[in-house]
Amino acid sequence: MKASELSDELAGLLPRIQRLARRRLWSGLSAPRLRGAHAELLRLVVSEPGVRVSTAARSLCLAANSVSTLVNHLVAEGLLLRARDPGDGRAALLYPTPAGAEKLHEWHARREALFRRHLAGLDGGDRAALTAALPALHRLAASIREEDETE
């Protein structure tokens, strides 16, 4: 496959897999339902309690105002706490609530079950091919991120 064909295929297929997975995850998920970006932000805050909004924006490759909008939604849903940074009163620090940590656990469990179920339906050769592709996909993501960070 030519590089141009591969790029078109990947650029179309990866978001499609994400959309399909999110649609399946949303159905039956208790309210409030986590959208993809909400889940990514919550995952980051659970793994790095006290993270600044600006740091979260860089980590997620999102604009700071977009992360602020996500934060506002998650705070309103009771999934995140926003606290003033004692070292810089203009900055906000983010912390998960117990409900937020539980919601993320529910999201992860459902996502893992979804992918496990569908991967089990593939033959061994397909699973091996996907496993073999993971390092290259990680390098592709890192390359795109590097370019984004240099701009």
Image (spheres, rainbow, N blue to C red):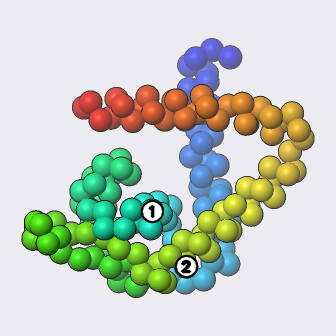
- Residue 54 point in image, percent of width and height: 24, 56
Instruction: Please determine whether, in this image, residue 100 is positioned above or below residue 112.
Output: below
| Residue in the image at 54% along x and 77% along y | 103
Instruction: Please determine whether, in this image, residue 57 is positioned above or below residue 88.
Output: above
Task: Tell me which label, 2 or 1, sits earlier in the chain.
Answer: 1
Instruction: Please state which of residues 25 and 137 is positioned toward the viewer in this rendering.
Output: 137
| Residue in the image at 65% along x and 58% along y | 21
Q: Is residue 26 left or right of residue 114?
A: left
Position of the C terminus by quadrant = top left
Q: Amino acid at mark 2?
A: Glu
Q: Amino acid at mark 1?
A: Ser
Q: Is residue 42 left or right of residue 130?
A: left
Q: Is residue 74 left or right of residue 150?
A: right
Tally of numbered discs: 2
- Residue 51 point in image, percent of width and height: 31, 63
Q: Is residue 86 left or right of residue 93?
A: left
| Residue in the image at 38% along x and 51% along y | 60
Position of the N terminus by quadrant = top right
- Residue 142 point in image, percent of width and height: 45, 33
Instruction: Please determine whether, in this image, residue 66 is positioned above or below residue 128.
Output: below
Residue behind mark 2 = 102
Instruction: Please state which of residues 35 and 123 is positioned toward the viewer in this rendering.
Output: 123
Residue behind mark 1 = 47
